[in-house]
Amino acid sequence: MAEQDREHDHGYLLDNRQSEAGIRFDALSELFDPVTFRHVDRLGIAAGMRCWEAGAGGPSVPLGLAERVGPSGTVVATDIDVSWTRDIAGGAIEVLRHDVAADPPPPGGFDLVHARLVLVHVTDRAEALRRMIQALRPGGWLLLEDADPELQPLLCPDESGPEQWLANRLRSGFRSLMAARGADLTYGRTLPRLLREAGLDDVQADAYFPITSPPCAVLEAATVRQIRGRLVAAGLATDEEIDRHLANVATGRLDLATAPMISAWGRRRA
């Protein structure tokens, strides 16, 4: 979920080195792990298999995959910044510092290659996709899950008052910062076509986004704290507006949504 370009000032906007990153990873895990593992289990990932978790970010997905493949299997968790996964290395889990768009795939071939909320932030998405497909064993599955902020751009879909209007304006500023760093805000919807065009079989996809959930509020507050300096520097918000928005979020009365996460999967021909 946290693959980023090598230079800190380009690519991924939400720096893993900030303390808020751990809060974000926990919230994303609570929101999206049930969706991810519903797909993983449907694809038949089981004992003895080899999995590559690209752009792992936090530890929850590698740990969940390790439970499924058992001691006879392997989970390779990679990211440019392994701050939040290095402590889970051992047993079935191997942790590697790795750039999915620039470095060769980890060796050995994989029954599953998975990336969640990663490629939307990667400048050379096409090359990253090519390398992930290259890493699949014949018959192996690629499962990509990525956001599509333009498909549902609002933080508060129910724009019922000034608190919601402010929230949506700040979310618009966040999207502007992402786009300026090369993020493709319509990438999620392209995944089924891209997997078919890459020659994968049995391609399917679905989408999920919560509209009201406590982890949405946790995620929003941590995200805004991470980017507040950039919002202010770009003239997209004032410190007073950000403080007011964070106070509004803390009340628990805003119905906060995420961008839709589109999950797409396909199999490499045997």
Image: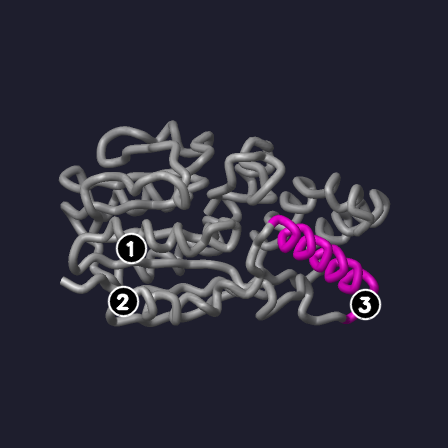
- Looking at the image, residue 84 lies above or below residue 243: above
1 and 2 marks in contact (CB < 8 Å): yes
User: Would residue 180 be counted in the magenta stretch?
Assistant: yes
Marked residue nearer the N-terminal end (1 or 2): 1
Q: Toward which corner of the image does residue 152 lie, by quadrant?
A: bottom right
Numbered disc in front, either 1 or 3 = 1
Gap between marks 1 and 2, in whole Å? 9 Å
Give the left or right position of residue 36, taking residue 255 as reference: left
Marked residue nearer the N-terminal end (2 or 3): 3
Q: Residues within 10 Å of mark 2 (few under 14, many from 20)?
A: few
Which residues make up the magenta segment?
Answer: 160-181
Q: Amino acid at mark 3?
A: Gly
At 45% from the left and 54% from the top, the residue drawn is: 125
Mark 3 residue element = loop
At 60% from the left and 33% from the top, the residue drawn is: 18
Question: Which one is nearer the viewer's eye here, 144 or 62?
Answer: 144
Give percent across and percent down for residue 252: 69, 55
Mark 2 residue element = loop
Which of the image's four quarters has the C terminus?
bottom left
**Which colouring convention does the figure follow?**
one colour
Q: Amino acid at mark 1?
A: Ile
Disc number for residue 161: 3
According to the picture, the residue beneath numbered tag 2 turns out to be: 199
Give the left or right position of residue 221, taking residue 194 as reference: right
2 and 3 marks in contact (CB < 8 Å): no
Give percent across and percent down for residue 215: 56, 52
**Please, what is the dominant secondary structure of the magenta stretch?**
helix
At 31% from the left and 30% from the top, the residue drawn is: 89
At 82% from the left and 48% from the top, the residue drawn is: 235
Disc number for residue 133: 1
